[in-house]
Amino acid sequence: MGYFAIALTLIMAVFVTAIYMVEAKVRDRDLAERSAAVARLFALKLDSDGNLMRAVARAMMGNQAIAEAFHRGDRDGLERNARDLFETLRSDHRITHLYFTGPDRINLYRLHTPAEHGDRIDRTTMLQAHSRKQAVQGLELGPLGTLTLRLVMPWRQREHSLGYVELGEEVKHLIDEVGDSLAVDLVVLIDKRYLERKQWQRGQALMNRQGDWDRFSSHVTLAQTSRLPTGLDNRALASLLNGESARIAEGERSLHMAMVPLENAAGHPIGKLAIMRDATALEATFNNYMAGVVLLSLAVAAGVLGVFYAALERVERDYRRQHELEHRLLHLDTEHQRMLQVEKLSALGTMVGGIAHQLNNPLVGVVNMAQLAEREAEDPARTRELLADIRHAGEDCRGFVRRMLEFSKISCFDSKPTDVAALIEDTVLMFRQTEARHLPVEVQLPDEPPLLTIDPILIRHALFNLLQNAAQATEGNAGITIRLEPLSDANSGAPGWSLSVADRGRGIAPEVMDKIFVPFFTTRSDGTGLGLPVVLHVVLLHDGQVTATNRPDGGTLFAIWLPQADRHPV
């Protein structure tokens, strides 16, 4: 019970850990999706406001008074005619910059800072608009630490260039709109490599802002939708800059942070846009849910322990009863062992009978050929021929005995390139000399018989067994057909050869068909049940197959399939 309780505790711990890992994964996926949404929406806002500034610039170019003042280089005229338009744009559309710049990129007039003029504008948007002769927009970092969306549009009249009109807006209101839309807080962080501290401090003073240059070692805050959490330090910032997410505790709040890159109009990275997601309510809901699940699981575990304890008591009672039964049955074990010994001796006797059967067939042929040799003693050529057949039969018997000694452990066999046609002819000759009825045997060979790497002794024995089996199944003087033909494996498609033996007997009964290759199974009173199992064993040693089917016109067809590929001795 103690071990079971420990196991339940471990399972509970693993379950809670897995749930928290799933929650963290869901949280990170939600933050990643929101980060991607922030990047997309921020880009859409930039495009939308850029299109608005394009429309404003085109409308301004249609104002004849502004165009004439620009053409004359009249700053007072630009002030009189463009001031009201600029104030409307600043109050309604948050456009904070309006420049009029000559064709030589020398600034003529700034409506947002009228006292500053006469300087050359070399910002990226101006240079791109000057070289491309078309409107260009994009984010640009000002020398005073301002990040502005700028639009620079060339102004031409009758093939004459008046110069460039430039509009700009700071990104503060853009990140406010994006944050409100996606329920996140945003912070614009600029890499300090692109800023000078004095210039940045001057810009902060001009815009009545209080920035902290020294808070981070590598970046400075330019704009934000809410106060930065105190837990956001250099270590957390370094983790965020490496593309990881961060969880920062701020009092009772839980903030999850990630970053997306910021690029200027030239496509160069200038900083990061940090996304802060307040997950306090989400984590509280999850923790409450987990507490409920854990309590419910503990209750279920207590119930399981109770049921298990009751089951153990019942098992213990059953075990005692079983122990008593085992004592009662103990005295039967000796008798059972005797029965097993008798069965083993019976199986051994059956196997010996099968081996005798396998050896008897060629030995009968040896005796018959020896008798023929005695009668043909005056014919030396015939006698030598019979003695050669006797020697071959003896060698086959010796080889068979050696194979039978190694049969149980399926040892290596002596495979070598063999003329299958000659092997068939030798086997048929031995069969005709041993078969009493002299049944006709028809041999069908291809025009070019194959040379296969096989064990000729084992294959000869397998074919001889199939011929003996066919002779036993044949009634009267019906013939036996042996056929050798090329045939691919039905399953793998491997090339090979089919060696089949067909008889014209009654066929095999359906209820017997599944048992014909089972050792010691036989339907004959004088059979051993080892002939077909030996055939199967020999074929398997050659990576082949053996099948048995009833022929439609009567009789049985046994087919041995051997692979074409050469086999190398093991």
Image (cartoon, rainbow, N blue to C red):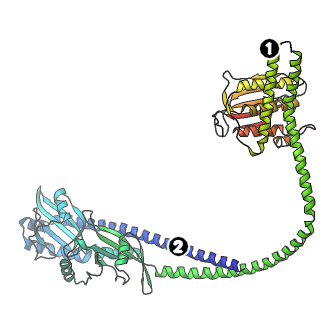
Determine whether the residue tagged by mark 1 lies in a helix, strand or loop.
Answer: helix
The mark found on residue 381 in the picture is 1
Q: Position of residue 412 (x, y in %)?
A: 70, 40
> Residue placed at 82% from the left, 17% from the top?
383
Q: Residue furthest bottom?
A: 251
Indicate which disc, 1 or 2, sits on the residue closer to the N terminus.
2
**Viewer-nearest residue: 470 or 416:** 416
Q: Position of residue 132 (x, y in %)?
A: 19, 56
Amino acid identity at mark 1: Ala
Q: In which quadrant of the rendered view does residue 306 lie? A: bottom right
Q: Could you give the CA–CA distance between mark 1 and mark 2, rounded to whole angstroms? A: 93 Å
Amino acid identity at mark 2: Met
Q: Is residue 29 left or right of residue 390?
A: left
Determine whether the residue tagged by mark 2 lies in a helix, strand or loop.
Answer: helix
Where 108 sits versus 335, above or below?
A: below
> Residue placed at 84% from the left, 39% from the top?
530
**Viewer-nearest residue: 334 or 191:** 334
Q: In which quadrant of the rendered view does residue 136 lie? A: bottom left
Q: In which quadrant of the rendered view does residue 416 lie? A: top right
> Residue placed at 6% from the left, 70% from the top?
74
**Viewer-nearest residue: 212 or 381:** 381
Q: Position of residue 418 (x, y in %)?
A: 68, 28
Residue 552 shows up from this direction: no
Mark 2 = which residue? 21
Which quarter shows the N terminus?
Answer: bottom right
The mark found on residue 466 in the picture is none
> Residue placed at 20% from the left, 69% from the top?
167
Residue 441 shows up from this direction: yes
Where 426 sits versus 459, above or below?
A: above
Which quarter shows the C terminus?
Answer: top right
